[in-house]
Amino acid sequence: MTSGQTALSDAARLSVAPMMDWTDRHCRHLHRLLSRRTLLYTEMVTAPAVIHGDRERLLGFGDTEHPVALQLGGSDPAELREAARIGAEFGYDEINLNCGCPSDRVQSGAFGAVLMTRPDLVAECCAEMIAVSPVEVTVKCRIGVDEQEPETVLPHFLETVAAAGVRRFTIHARKAWLQGLSPKENRDIPPLDYDLVARMKRAFPHLHLSVNGGVGSLDEAEPFLKAGLDGVMIGRAAYHAPADVLCEADRRIWGDPGTSRAEAAVRDMLPYIEAHLSAGGRLHQVTRHMLGLFAGRPGARGWRRVLSEGASRPGAGPELVIEALGRVEDLQQAA
Ligand SMILES: Cc1cc2nc3c(=O)[nH]c(=O)nc-3n(C[C@H](O)[C@H](O)[C@H](O)COP(=O)(O)O)c2cc1C
C-alpha cells in the first residue's frame, strides 16, 4: 500500500456519504470546518459528464476539502478510465465507483445498484480505472438487488472486484429494489443486515470494509469500529445534524485533542460566503447546507427560520448569517 492509501484508509474510519444535490463543495467546506479528519465524498458525477461536461463546475473543489473522494457513476470501462484519470488529475484523493444508487436515471444508464448483478463488468471497470489513476479506486455497493441472495452475491461481488485490485469497499447494508421502490424508499424500506457486513469482514480480513446505512450518530458508529469493521459511512444524519456527528469525530474516532463548535464553524464560514458572493454566487447556495447546524439545540428553530426565509432574497449576505447566529446565542445565554 502507498502512504497515500494508508492515510486514506485511516480517514475512511468515518466518512460522510456521497449525496446528490447535498454534498456539493459548499457542504463539504462546512463539514471540513467541523472535522479535519473525516473523509468526504462528492455527489455522484457520471463518467460522460466528467468527460464532456463543464469540468470546473462539476469537479471544482477547494484546497480545504482534503481528504475528499470523487464518486463516479458509469459502467463503460473506457469512459470510467478517462473519468478516473481526469478526476485524479483534478486532485481528488480517491475515485469511488457507485454500485449502490437505485434511481431511475441511473438504472437507464445501466449503472449504480444494477451493477450488483454484473461483478465481472465492475471488475473490468475498476481495472481500467486503476490502470490510469495514481489515487486509490474504491467501490460503494449494496448487499444485493431484487431477488438476489445477499449471502452468496455479496462475497462473490467482493471477491471478483477485489481481484481487479480494489481493496476498500463501502457497503450500504441493505438491498436495493430496482422496480417498485423510489430511491428514497430504497434508503429506508429494505431491511438492514449489518451482520452480513460483519461476516464479510471476517471472510475478507485483508479488505477495508466500511458499513453504511441507518447510522445516526457517533454513538451508533463506534460499536462497528470496535467490532472490527474498518470504517463507518454516515449520510443523512451527517447532513441533517452535521455538528452532532462531526464536532466530536476527530477526538472520538481518531483520538485527536479538542472538538469543534458549530458557532465557530458559522464564523469561519463567513469569509467563504463572502468569496462565494463576490464570485457571483447566492447566499442560499451555501446556507441551505447550514440549516441543521444547531439541530436539537436552543435557537435551532430561529436559526433555520432566519436563514430559510432570508437567504434567497436578492442581495442577502453574511449579515443575515450573523443575525441568525445572534438568535442562537441569545437563547443559549438565556438558557
Ligand atoms: C439526498 C441523497 C442523495 C444520495 N445520492 C447518492 C449518490 O450520489 N451516490 C451514492 O452512492 N449514494 C447516494 N445516496 C445514498 C447515500 O450515500 C447513503 O448510502 C444512504 O443515504 C444510506 O446512508 P444513511 O442511512 O447514513 O443516510 C444518497 C442519499 C441521499 C439521502
Image (tube, rainbow, N blue to C red):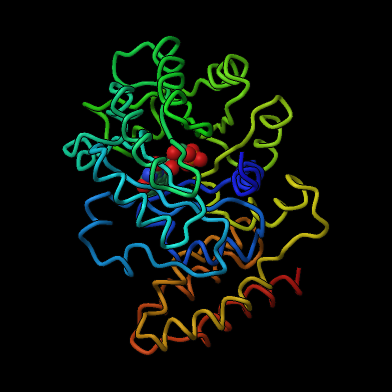
> To which quarter of the image does residue 332 belong?
bottom right
Q: Residue furthest front?
A: 131
- Identity of the residue drawn at 42% across and 22% down: 143
**Left or right: where 106 falls relative to 174:** left
- Number of numbered discs: 0
- Identity of the residue drawn at 29% across and 13% down: 147
**Left or right: where 77 falls relative to 63:** left
- Where does the image place residue 8, in percent across and percent down from the top left? 60, 46
On-image quarter of the N terminus: top right
Task: Judge by depth and name the residue closer to the eye, 305 or 253.
Answer: 253
- Where does the image place residue 299, in percent across and percent down from the top left? 62, 68
On-image quarter of the C terminus: bottom right
- Residue 184 vertical position relative to residue 135 in the rendered view, above or below: above
- Where does the image place residue 220, in percent across and percent down from the top left? 66, 35
- Image quarter for ligand 1 equals top left
- Residue 332 vertical position relative to residue 137 in the rendered view, above or below: below
Q: Residue furthest left?
A: 108
Task: Judge by depth and name the residue closer to the eye, 184 or 104.
Answer: 104
- Where does the image place residue 43, in percent across and percent down from the top left? 39, 53
- Residue 142 vertical position relative to residue 155 in the rendered view, above or below: below
Task: Judge by depth and name the residue closer to the eye, 206 or 37.
Answer: 206
- Identity of the residue drawn at 63% across and 78% down: 267
